[in-house]
Image (cartoon, rainbow, N blue to C red):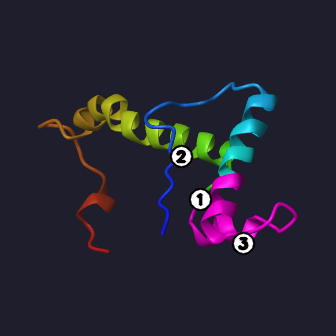
Amino acid sequence: MLLVSLDFSNRVLAGLPVYLTCRLQSVLNAAGRLTYHLRRPDHITDVLVCLHWLRVPEQVQFKIAILVYKVMPQYLGPLNRIADQYGRRSLRSASTCH
């Protein structure tokens, strides 16, 4: 079985022109067709789903979401410490068990 990786490493391709996005999608589709021995007129959507591959715009959105997820604790961390300071009143809901 042929293993194909088009992960774009750690690069975020946000702001990429549409024609380059289409070219990258074409390469991704060709790799899927090669993997499943399909012809050009065959539909590629099911192949991408089977391989768990996202389309190029979806990959860009996913990479941005991952970066935001990783960065958020660094910015929200200091705000969390203010609420935990000694001598500050805590909320009643903090002591209830869910």
Q: Horizontal and vertical percent for residue 47?
A: 68, 69
Query: In whole angstroms, how far apart are the C-alphas of marks 3 and 2?
Result: 18 Å
Residue 64: quarter of image: top right
Number of numbered discs visible in the structure rendering: 3
Q: Which residue is mark 1?
A: 53
The earlier-in-sequence mark between 3 and 2 is: 2
Badge 1 vs badge 2, beta-carbon distance below 8 Å: yes
Q: Is residue 58 left or right of residue 89?
A: right
Q: Which residue is mark 3?
A: 46
Instruction: Pick the residue in front: 51 or 95.
Output: 51
| Marker disc for residue 6 | 2
From mark 1 to mark 3, how far is it between C-alphas?
10 Å
Q: Position of residue 52 (x, y in %)?
A: 56, 65
Q: Nearer the viewer, mark 1 or mark 2?
A: 2
Picture quadrant of residue 50: bottom right
Residue 36 horizontal/vertical position (percent): 64, 70
Specify the segment rendered in magenta. 29-53
Is residue 80 positioned above or below 98 on the image?
Answer: above
Furthest residue to the left?
Answer: 86
Secondary structure beneath disc 3?
helix
Residue at x 28%, y 34% (from the top left corner): 77
Query: Considering the numbered disc 2 on the image, is that residue within a helix, a strand or a loop?
Result: loop
Instruction: Point out the image quarter for the C terminus.
Output: bottom left
The kind of residue tagged 2 is Leu
Q: Secondary structure at mark 1?
A: loop
